[in-house]
Amino acid sequence: MSVERDIRNKLTAALAPEVLEIVNESHRHAGHASSPGTGMSHFTIKVVSAAFSGKSRLERHRMINAVLAEELKGAVHALAIEAHAPEERLPPQ
């Protein structure tokens, strides 16, 4: 199973997101000294979930990091997170 699919499955199961976008940005880091060169190591995620209501930005990031702890210990070298509650106004894309 791919790292991206694992991320999607785990976040979906844990957070029941209304929006879940996962962008693999590993190609942008190819050749960097700290890049493992797997093509599945650098991700940006955007999550909108009711589970984030009333939570601070730090609490939301900690929730995601806990769900993805296994990936963050191994395959995932970098993870950029954008986490919102449904009632929050999302920034324009």
Image (cartoon, grey):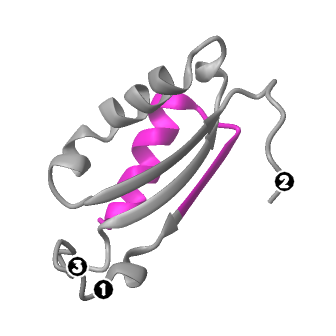
Viewer-side label of 3, 2? 2
Quadrant into which the N terminus falls: bottom left
Q: Secondary structure at mark 2?
A: loop
Mark sitting on residue 38: 3
**Disc 3 element:** loop
Give residue 89's position: percent from left, percent from top. Answer: 84, 34
Q: Earlier in the sequence, mark 2 or mark 1?
A: 1
Three-letter amino acid code at the position of disc 3? Thr
Residue 73 in the figure: left or right of residue 3: left
**Magenta-highlighted residues:** 1-22
Cα distance, mark 2 to mark 1? Answer: 29 Å
**What is the residue that sits farthest to the bottom in this orientation?**
31
Residue 91 is situated, as x and y percent measured from the top left of the image, at 80, 46
Q: CA distance from mark 1 to mark 3?
A: 9 Å
Q: Amino acid at mark 2?
A: Pro
Residue 70: image location, x then y, percent:
20, 44
Q: Earlier in the sequence, mark 1 or mark 3?
A: 1
Q: Where's the C terminus, which quadrant?
A: bottom right
User: Disc 3 or 2, which lies upstream in sequence?
Assistant: 3
Q: Is residue 82 left or right of residue 43?
A: right
Indicate which disc residue 30 carries: 1
Can you name the residue that lies furthest to the top here?
A: 54
